[in-house]
Every structure is written in structure tokens, then in C-alpha cells.
Image (cartoon, coloured by chain):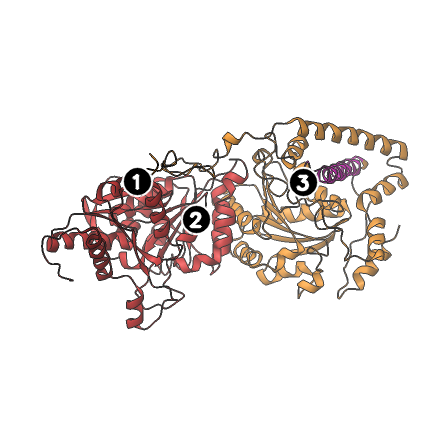
Chain colours: A red, B orange
């Protein structure tokens, strides 16, 4: 195990996969000479050359489509779309082409493509640069969507995505790039389609993905320390396929759930998780499923408004308290946030 | 035979088409012309049979035919080697035939049967045949253009000798994907020939009403891509122009070829094309590439009426066999619905039919028990 940042884990994994397989190459805006907007690809142009680290024109539809076409001929492109907001410009290629080609042609062509792209608000980037629209892709059959929340998962899921023969949208997060964690030294891929229970508990299930899986774990640890609460945390890791079984089994044990998400609430990922709990654990619920999600506004620039729009740790804690209060669960001590 | 009507029609528009004159006085051997004719006739009869199948409700969805485009199809495809790749759009039955795909499997695809070239998953707009390197008909206007560009990138990446041909309609040249792709191909010296089939109409909107530069081949200049315009009713002219384009691409420069073609009928089978004047319809008939070539073959002594009639009978009989094969092919079984969810299987992949609950059997009510 090595302690490293999420950014470093991504960088090192790209490098090791490029060394392992010469069909793996990188495409994207400013990933070469500029070393990437978030420096994930720093040094790779120098090491691998222009053939394998391609600076593209600002043409998301064109270069994403070109990556799909190259993948159809057996290459394994890893495309960086600078932020998920810009992926909208490539929506036709991702949804109408990458997601369709395998099925629409009766299995004759595969699209082993990875699209790496960060979401995330909280950087005062305003309405067009702060969105969490992974739902658009998680909605579409034919795509796989993964969302690592730790450096270890960033590595294991990126290996899995690159070696997978289907198009994978690999969701990163601006706020996670500098977070650190222990990363295994071996190159074992993660299982796409499996969630992880990152903290076991019996009082309530907290469910999140990407940055919010990280925050949920932190909140659960705090509540254990301060309130003696025993909260289970699920990191979804994979948004398509969605590991419904792990969610339902946890709620059957804890009888209560709070879903935390950085996207908008209405029709969001949390809505699908809540529906899953309703379908699979209805008789086990002691309280309505709560969702903590971003306020439904275009993200404002001003810090006070941006902070108000984003789900906070305190928002999560209050939702947990209110859910447990509804059940009549008694906390061992008064919480710090009461 | 003159082209006065056709040229007059074109002249009535904002621009004049600099047509390369029909050159059917054998610049190539007579056998080549006869081969082209046989193939054009085959595509003509196949498409007519497809139209009939559509009106008989044996074919569903959208169905766009290559009627009037036959000379362009055979000329273009004649320039490709077996290892070269073809990407095209939703008007692609003729291209698949010319590429060598078994027409029985093309018709079976139109019928939505298991023997279809895309196993009944694609339909008219989405034919795919890896064996003959037809990498897809695509239903979204412009969708195939970035994909084809990426295929050319893969060839270049591996230092391959193949080229990609990517055909599209005139309307495609106004979509962003076209410009983004040509820019990338121009920048990276990709081995690709972009072909615009300019039949003068989107669905019913003319090129002049949709393109600020209606001489579409000129758009190559913006990306320093060599380009030319050719008469799409003359298979030899198309073949020669395509041959040159393919040579340029094989030498690692993209090429843009505009083929001025015709669409004899509506945009799709169900379009009566009421937006066309009687003059226009008469002109289309007069310039029908299949009839024009037949007339010239006889006039030049390459063939005679009886031989051509015999050829037509042979083709018609073949087409009936093809339709019978498609009709006899089985419909896909419902149990195969999830066969192509993913190429790499993963846990928790959804295989739920519309009425099925997510978790096992539907819960029974506790109230009445």
C-alpha cells in the first residue's frame, strides 16, 4: 500500500495501463503540452509522445466520436473531457453512438472506450461549470458509469474501465483530486457494477457516490464519535449498473436510509436509489427515505449562495437526526449539532 | 441525349454546377460498364422490392432508398479495396450490396429477421457487416462522420495501409460534427475520403436554402483538404474521381468528394415528394442513371435490348429469391432481448422485462391474509 492523492492514483494508473497495452492512448483538450487542466496527465506526453497523448482541438463531439471510431477498430482510447459540463457537446456521440453500437449492430462491434471527466461544484465556477449531470449517462443502457470516491477506487475502477470492452463514463470530482488514501500496489481491477459498504452499522444506512460517498463516511465517523451512532455507509461506486442488492440488504438491516448526492434532487440518482429501497425493502422501513441533494437552481457564483445551494455535512447530520427521531431512536449523547 | 433539362434546373438555382460531361464512350473496357450496369440494375430492383415490402408491411420503421443514386454507389465502392472501411448513413442498402454483403441478409435485416446482417437489431438505417468492412449505416445525420474519422485515426495509429470512406448527404455538411471531423482529419493527416452525396434536397429543403456555400466541395478548403465535385449520374466519372480520392487518402491526406446525384423518389418510402414540380419529376425520369446507361450501352454497341432484358429478368428472379429468403427467416426470439446488453458482462446488469418487479415476485398484501 502507498499513501497517495486521488490525482496521483489516476496519473499512475493511466501510465501503467499505457505501459501494459500499446492500444491504450489518451485524447483530450490540453492534456499534452499543458499537462491537463487538473494535471492528471502531467509528464505523459514527454514519456509516450504525441501519438499516444493527443492534444485535440476544442471539439468534444469530434474527438469523442473519433475515439469511439478508433475503439471500434480495437484501440482503447481514454478520453479526457475537461469537465462533465462540456460532455454535453458530445452527447450525441456518447448516447446515440457509443452506447448503441454494440447492441444496434447485433454484437458485431465493441467500443472499449473510457471517458474520464470531473463533476463537482463548490469552486465558484458558476452555473455552467458546476454541474453534476452523470445522471444523463447513468440513464442510458449500453453505457457503464463509475464514480470512485477514494484514491484506491480511482485506481481499481480506472483499470477495470480501461480493460472493459464497453464504453465507460468515469466520473471524477474536482474536490476529490487532492484527497489522499492508501492505494494497493497491485493492479487488480475493481468489479464494475458492485457497490461497497465502507462502514458497517445498524442504526441507519447512508448512501452516496463520488464526493458524497467521501463526505458520508466522514459524517458517519463523526456521529459515531459524538453520538455513539452506528451508521452504515454505502459507496455506490457504479451508477450503471446499479448494485441494488447491496442497498436493499443494508436497509433491511438498518430499517432507515438517507441518500446524499451532489446532483439535483428531482429525478436524480437518489430518486432511483429511493425507488430501489421502496421496491426491495418496503416492509423493513421504519421511516421515509430521506434525500439530501443540491438546491434546484443554476449554481450561483457568489460564495454565500453557492454554499447555500450545495449539500453540507450539517445538512446530512440533520437529515440523519430527523430520520432517527422519527423512528424514536435514542442517541447515547446529545449531538454536537443539536 | 442531352442534360439540358437537368442543367437548366440546376441553373435556376443560385449556382451553376460545373458538370463533368458523361463519358460513356468506353474510357474503360466494355466489361466494366456492363458490370456497373448489372450492379446498378440490381440495386434498382432491390430497392423497388424493398418499397413493395414496405407497403406490404413486411418492413417497418423508416426506409430510405438509393433510387437515383445507383451510379454514385457503384462508382464509389469500385474504388475501395476489400480491406478498406466504409461508414455511411441511413440510405445504405445499395452500399452494402456493392460492398459485397449478401443481399439476402440485407433484405432479412429489413424484415427484422435473425438472418439479417445486424441480426434484426438495426433495420434499414443500421446495416453492419464486419466481414465486408461496412462499419455501419447510421441513423443520426452526421453521426458517422466523427466515427469514420476515428477509424482512420486507428489505421494511422497502426501504420496500416487501409483507407476509410465516409459517405453522407448534402445536409450533413451543415452539422458541427462534419466540421469538427474535417478539422481533425486535416490536422492529423488521416487516411479518409469524405463523400458528400448531394442530391439537392435534405428532406424537402434544398441545398441552396440550407447551405450558405452551396458548392459543398469548397468546404474542404477551410481545412486544407483537397476536394472535387463530380457528376453522380455517370458511374465511370464517379469511379475515376473516387479512385483519385482514395489514392490521396492512401498517401495520408484526407479528401472531400462531392457527388452530384439525384433522389428519384421521396426522402423515404412514405414521402410522396409533393414539393417537387412536374418539370422536376420529368427531368428526374429523363436523367435516371440506370435508364441512361442502358441507352448508352445499346447505342455504343456494347449490348443490345434483348441482352439487357434478359439481364433484368435474371435480376428480378434473384430478387424474388432474396425476398423469399427474408420471408422464411425466423423472427428473433424474445429470450434474446438482453443478448447484447454489454460486451463485457458485469454484475447487476438489468435484464428486467417491462412488467417484472425489481426484486423477485411482486409482494403479496399482508392486509388480506
Given residues B358 and A157, the one toward you in this image is B358
Is residue B96 magenta-colored?
no
Q: Confirm or deny contact between disc 3 and disc 2 (CB under 8 A).
A: no
Say left or right for A289 vs B100: left
Q: Which circle marks residue B93 in the picture?
A: 3
Q: Badge 1: few (under 14), some or many (20 or more) residues near its Cα, within 10 Å? A: some
Range of residues picked out in magenta: B31-59
Secondary-structure class at tag 3: helix
Residue under mark 3: which chain is it in? B
The subunit carrying tag 2 is A
First reached walking from the N terminus: tag 1 or tag 2:
2
Which residue carries the number 1 mark? A190
Circle 2 residues within 10 Å: few <14, some 14–19, many ≥20: some
In the displayed structure image, the side of residue B26 where residue B360 appears, left or right? left
Q: Nearer the viewer, residue A79 or A42?
A: A79
Q: What is the CA distance from the residue labelled 3 to the residue labelled 2?
A: 32 Å
Instruction: Report how far apart the C-alphas of labels 1 and 2 lie in the structure.
Output: 22 Å
Is disc 3 in the same subunit as disc 1? Answer: no
Amino acid at each position: 500500500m502507498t499513501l497517495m492523492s486521488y490525482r496521483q492514483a489516476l496519473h499512475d494508473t493511466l501510465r501503467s495501463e499505457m505501459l501494459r497495452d500499446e492500444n491504450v492512448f489518451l485524447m483530450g483538450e490540453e492534456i499534452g503540452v499543458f499537462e491537463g487542466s487538473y494535471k492528471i496527465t502531467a509528464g505523459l506526453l514527454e514519456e509516450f509522445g504525441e501519438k499516444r497523448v493527443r492534444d485535440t482541438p476544442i471539439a468534444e463531439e469530434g474527438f469523442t466520436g473519433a475515439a469511439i471510431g478508433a475503439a471500434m477498430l480495437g484501440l482503447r482510447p481514454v478520453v479526457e473531457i475537461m469537465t462533465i459540463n462540456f460532455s454535453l457537446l458530445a452527447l450525441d456521440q456518447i448516447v446515440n453512438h457509443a452506447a448503441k453500437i454494440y447492441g444496434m449492430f447485433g454484437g458485431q462491434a465493441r467500443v472499449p472506450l473510457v471517458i474520464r471527466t470531473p463533476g463537482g461544484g463548490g469552486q465558484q465556477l458558476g452555473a455552467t461549470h458546476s454541474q453534476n449531470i452523470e445522471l444523463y449517462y447513468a440513464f442510458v443502457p449500453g453505457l457503464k458509469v463509475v464514480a470512485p470516491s477514494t484514491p484506491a477506487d480511482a485506481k481499481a475502477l480506472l483499470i477495470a474501465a480501461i480493460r472493459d470492452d464497453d464504453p465507460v463514463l468515469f466520473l471524477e470530482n474536482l474536490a476529490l483530486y487532492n484527497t489522499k488514501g492508501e492505494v494497493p500496489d497491485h493492479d487488480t481491477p475493481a468489479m464494475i457494477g458492485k457497490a461497497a459498504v465502507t462502514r458497517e452499522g445498524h442504526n441507519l444506512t447512508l448512501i452516496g457516490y463520488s464526493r458524497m460517498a467521501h463526505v458520508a463516511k466522514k459524517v458517519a465517523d463523526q456521529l459515531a464519535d459524538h453520538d455513539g451512532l452506528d451508521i452504515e455507509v454505502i459507496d455506490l461506486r457504479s451508477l450503471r449498473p446499479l448494485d441494488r442488492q447491496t442497498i436493499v440488504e443494508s436497509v433491511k438491516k438498518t430499517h432507515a436510509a438517507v441518500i446524499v448526492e451532489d446532483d439535483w434532487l428531482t429525478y436524480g440518482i437518489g430518486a432511483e436509489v429511493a425507488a430501489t429501497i421502496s421496491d426491495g425493502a418496503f416492509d423493513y422501513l421504519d421511516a421515509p427515505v430521506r434525500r439530501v441533494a443540491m438546491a434546484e437552481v443554476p449554481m450561483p457564483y457568489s460564495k454565500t449562495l453557492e454554499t447555500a445551494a450545495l449539500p453540507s455535512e450539517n445538512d446530512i447530520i440533520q437529515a440523519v437526526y430527523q430520520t432517527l427521531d422519527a423512528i424514536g431512536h435514542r442517541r447515547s449523547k446529545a449531538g454536537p449539532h443539536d | 441525349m442531352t442534360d439540358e433539362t437537368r442543367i437548366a434546373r440546376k441553373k435556376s438555382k443560385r449556382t451553376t454546377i460545373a458538370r463533368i460531361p458523361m463519358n460513356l464512350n468506353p474510357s474503360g473496357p466494355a466489361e466494366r460498364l456492363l458490370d456497373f450496369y448489372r450492379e446498378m440494375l440490381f440495386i434498382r430492383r432491390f430497392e423497388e422490392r424493398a418499397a413493395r415490402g414496405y407497403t406490404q408491411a413486411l418492413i417497418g420503421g423508416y426506409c430510405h432508398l438509393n433510387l437515383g443514386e445507383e451510379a454514385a454507389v457503384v462508382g464509389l465502392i469500385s474504388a475501395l479495396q476489400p480491406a478498406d472501411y466504409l461508414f455511411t448513413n441511413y440510405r445504405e442498402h445499395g452500399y452494402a450490396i456493392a460492398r459485397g454483403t449478401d443481399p439476402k441478409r440485407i433484405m432479412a435485416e429489413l424484415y427484422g429477421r435473425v438472418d439479417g446482417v445486424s441480426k434484426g437489431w438495426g433495420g434499414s438505417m443500421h446495416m453492419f457487416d464486419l466481414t465486408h468492412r461496412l462499419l455501419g449505416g447510421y441513423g443520426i445525420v452526421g453521426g458517422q462522420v466523427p466515427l469514420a474519422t476515428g477509424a482512420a485515426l486507428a489505421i494511422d495509429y497502426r501504420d496500416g495501409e487501409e483507407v476509410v470512406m465516409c459517405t453522407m448527404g448534402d445536409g450533413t455538411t451543415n452539422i458541427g460534427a462534419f466540421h469538427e471531423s474535417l478539422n481533425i482529419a486535416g490536422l492529423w493527416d488521416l487516411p479518409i475520403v469524405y463523400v458528400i452525396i448531394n442530391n439537392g434536397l435534405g428532406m424537402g429543403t434544398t441545398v441552396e436554402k440550407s447551405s450558405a456555400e452551396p458548392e459543398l466541395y469548397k468546404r474542404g478548403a477551410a481545412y486544407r483538404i483537397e476536394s472535387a465535385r463530380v457528376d453522380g449520374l455517370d458511374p465511370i466519372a464517379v469511379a475515376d474521381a473516387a479512385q483519385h480520392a482514395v489514392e490521396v487518402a492512401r498517401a495520408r491526406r484526407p479528401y472531400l468528394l462531392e457527388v452530384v446525384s439525384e433522389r428519384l423518389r421521396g426522402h423515404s418510402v412514405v414521402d410522396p415528394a409533393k414539393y417537387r414540380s412536374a418539370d422536376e419529376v420529368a427531368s428526374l425520369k429523363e436523367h435516371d442513371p440506370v435508364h441512361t446507361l442502358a441507352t448508352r450501352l445499346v447505342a455504343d454497341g456494347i449490348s443490345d435490348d434483348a441482352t439487357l432484358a434478359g439481364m433484368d429478368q435474371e435480376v428480378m428472379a434473384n430478387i424474388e429469391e432474396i425476398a423469399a429468403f427474408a420471408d422464411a427467416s425466423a423472427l428473433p426470439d424474445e429470450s434474446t432481448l438482453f443478448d447484447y446488453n454489454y460486451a463485457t458482462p458485469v454484475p447487476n446488469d438489468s435484464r428486467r422485462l417491462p412488467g417484472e418487479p425489481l426484486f423477485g415476485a411482486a409482494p403479496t398484501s399482508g392486509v388480506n391474509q
